[in-house]
Amino acid sequence: MRKRIDFICPTCKNKKRITINDEYNETHIDKILDRSLFNIKCDKCNTNIYLDYKFVLKTPNYSLSYGEFEDVDRMCSTYDDIKEKILIYEDKLNDCLIELSKRKIEHDLEKELDLRYDGIVEDKLVFYSLKEEKSYSFNKELYDYYVNKYKVVNINNEEVNSSNYFKYIKD
Ligand SMILES: [Zn+2]
């Protein structure tokens, strides 16, 4: 749905009315990931601003939302979370098992890293640490081992994150 909102520039307080969309599809993925979809420029002082608003992404294969929307596979509560889910779903991975992999990595390194999945490079899964602001990569074997070992229950309209993923994983 298209919505008109009032926008006030944080730099010069210029007020303007802009139109935002809160329903996106697969053609918008690149612009969601690089945030250009949410970037606007104040036409008075040229300040670049990133808007932060709730939206839903519906593709033929999955649906995700930032904020509460009905009938989605996963709900996310931050932009970083939905960005990570998009990358996981685009790479056809399972988010619960990615969370389990992250837990194992943190456990082995004995560090809290606040990792976010960032993609596959060759045979390695790349994670970005929001805490350390650097990337870590790990052999995909760990994830594949979990895929073979565990079953993940079907989940809809839920938020899956590092504090609840284990509820959905069965032996
Ligand atoms: Zn301005």
Image (spheres, grey):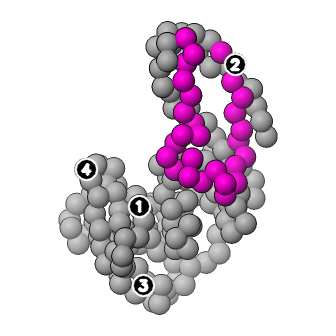
Q: Is residue 134 shown above or below 21?
A: below
Q: Are marks 1 and 4 in contact (CB under 8 Å)?
A: no
* Amino acid found under the numbered disc labelled 3: Asp
Q: Is residue 42 shown above or below 36?
A: above
Mark identifier at residue 118 = 1
Callout in the foreground (3, 1): 1
Return the residue at label 4.
132
When asked about the image quadrant of residue 160, the answer is: bottom right
Q: Is residue 31 magenta?
A: yes
Within 10 Å of the Cα at label 4, are there few (<14), some (14-19), or many (20+) other Cα atoms?
A: few
Q: How many marks?
A: 4
When asked about the image quadrant of residue 125, the answer is: bottom left
* Amino acid found under the numbered disc labelled 1: Asp
Magenta span covers which residues? 16-44
* Amino acid found under the numbered disc labelled 4: Glu
The mark nearer the N terminus, 4 or 2, is 2
Give the distance between the C-alpha atoms of the residues marked 4 and 2, in whole angstroms: 38 Å
What residue sits 70% from the left and 49% below the top?
24
Q: Is residue 84 left or right of residue 114?
A: right
Give the distance between the C-alpha atoms of the residues marked 2 and 3, in whole angstroms: 49 Å
Callout in the foreground (4, 2): 2
Image quarter where the N terminus lies is top right
The mark nearer the N terminus, 1 or 2, is 2
When asked about the image quadrant of residue 157, the answer is: bottom right
Return the residue at label 2.
17
Return the residue at label 3.
144
The mark nearer the N terminus, 3 or 1, is 1
